[in-house]
Image (cartoon, grey):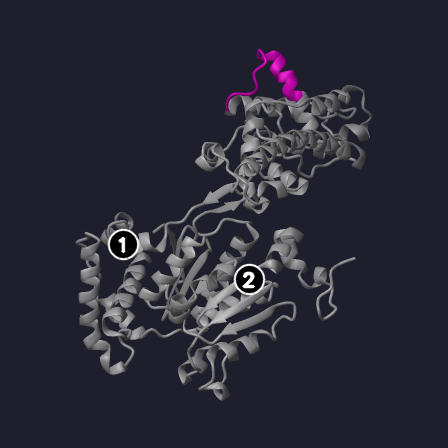
Amino acid sequence: MAAKGRSGLDKNNKYDRQLRLWGDHGQTLLEQARVCLVNVTATGTEIIKNLILPGIGSFTIVDGNKVKGEDVGNNFFLSQESIGESRAKIATELLNELNEDVSGDYEDEFPETLLQNNPDFFKKFTIVVATGLSERTLLQLADVLWQQSVPLLVCRSYGFIGHVRLVIKEHTVIESHPDNAHEDLRLDRPFPALIKYCDSLHLETMDKKDHSHTPWLVLIYKYLQEWKNQHDGLPPQNYKEKNQLKQMIREGTRKNADGVPEDEENFDEAVKSVNMALVPTKIPSVVEKLFNDPSAMNLTSESKPFWILLRAVREFVENEGKGALPLRGSIPDMTSDSERYIQLQNAYVEQANKDVAVITDKVNMLTSSLAKEIKQRDIGPEFIHGVSITDQEIKLFCKNAAFVQVLRCRSLAQEYNSQTANTQDIGSHLEDEDEESELIYYVLLRGVDRFYEEYNRYPGGDNDQVEPDVQLLKGVITKLTHEWGLTSTVKEDYIHEICRYGASELHTVASVIGGSAAQEVIKIITGQFIPIDNTFIYNAVKQTSLTITL
């Protein structure tokens, strides 16, 4: 029976579209997530709104401010009647109305105070989203979360500029959902079940119907064996030879009494699929690198399931797999009768299940070894993640073994330290006068934060201060770039424009950043798709963006 929400609605119907994206297991992780939003800015409420609608487990807002007139102008979750009341309380009440499956709470307290009195407060969250923080407070929060390995997403809208920064020590991804993945067909190294099935079919003795409904994968296999017999066991080596193989397949089409080739769609599919089907079976360089990662090489009682699974797959590759990853076990659609398509599919599923069984044994051996380590060290079993690895998790990992990835971001302290900042990329973007880069806005935003630390206000907040603040901000940015060891300067036109923004949040920009940032949060929570690494900058004037590692 499908799970029911508090409204009695069928969740499978309520969340149908997103379930197609990240599946039941992804939705379960989403419903278990606890998200913290720091500050009820227009951007912050847009982000949390876009997480409440798909059904996060709970959210908590931290904000000690009272609602002001300027808040009401750009934030749909604050009203004129609420001016003077707790910003966190009012926003939480209205956000709670969006989805009764989600519970919301708030702390009517400034994040600075919470960091000073109870920094462990943030440890309980799956991820923290921070908006509207000064540079000093942001670095304090980032340091606390970094030590506790809690992901942080820093977001802001500043006039026509949007900025998102992901800060996470390590994020492992099993289901990266690549856009253009090659099928795992293994025609260059066919496995026994595939060989047995293909050899059981004889094209020359088939009637017309069976001949035109033989799966194209079988056709390529058969003509590939014929090719190898004529070329010392070697497959086609180049473009010319692949075209020759295609011609062999075309000539295999049945002909009518007049010698005219029949219209056999499966043969046409085979010709079109030759290049794809002959892609050599190999391990992607990203996965090879992860095999040699210290986290995979040196398992401990605190190793994440990801690294235990990766180690088991590596041992499989080195032994039973003979240099290949476990078979994915799926085949593409193709013209065929149902019976033969299912038989072909079953051959792949059978081999994939055999590979999963071998890797399951290896996972059990690894977790047993780590369990002994726990016993010897006399520590609680909660310190080992591996013992809870399920058969479903192993199967999922094997199916996606070619696409696994690990993201490790730099800390915010590293980014903000002039000695460890990524000054090379910043400098190269500033020096490229022929192409205006969105990275200029990163420099400007860093400049306005420094301006705030020095003057306790943002530049241009008062219309009468725009022109005077242009020179003040120019001096702050010049000092900042000199700290980075750069001689490049920022054009005064940009500085004037950022002063005109006056730290305002435009709801349209906040909405774009709110959608983009919410997607990144969902990626982190579900462990699916690839998050940004690590900075995203959006220019609403030109409708352009930049993703860069800083």
Indicate which disc residue 295 carries.
Answer: none
Residue 10: give x, y in percent of width and height.
74, 64
Say left or right for 286 vs 268: left
Residue shown at the point (37%, 52%) measured from the top left: 411
Element under label 2? strand
Residue 281 visible in the snapshot: no
When the figure is inspected, residue 161 is found, relative to residue 487, above or below; the finding is below
Residue 505: give x, y in percent of width and height.
39, 73
Q: Nearer the viewer, residue 463 or 203?
A: 463
Badge 1 amino acid? Asn
Element under label 1? loop
When the figure is inspected, residue 307 is found, relative to residue 88, above or below; the finding is above
Residue shown at the point (50%, 88%) measured from the top left: 81
- Badge 2 is on which residue? 34
Q: Nearer the viewer, residue 364 or 43?
A: 364
Say left or right for 276 vs 118: right
Crowding around mark 2 (Cα neighbors within 10 Å: few <14, some 14 to 19, many 20+) is some
When the figure is inspected, residue 60 is found, relative to residue 398, above or below; the finding is below
Residue 316: give x, y in percent of width and height.
58, 27
Quadrant in the picture for residue 227? top right
Badge 2 amino acid? Arg
Residue 83 visible in the snapshot: yes
Please tell me how many numbered marks the rendered image carries.
2
Crowding around mark 1 (Cα neighbors within 10 Å: few <14, some 14 to 19, many 20+) is few
Indicate which disc residue 417 carries.
Answer: 1
Residue 229: give x, y in percent of width and height.
63, 12
Say left or right for 188 vs 410: right
- Which region is colored magenta? 223-238
- Mark found first going from the N terminus, 1 or 2: 2
Is residue 60 a member of the stretch shown in magenta?
Answer: no
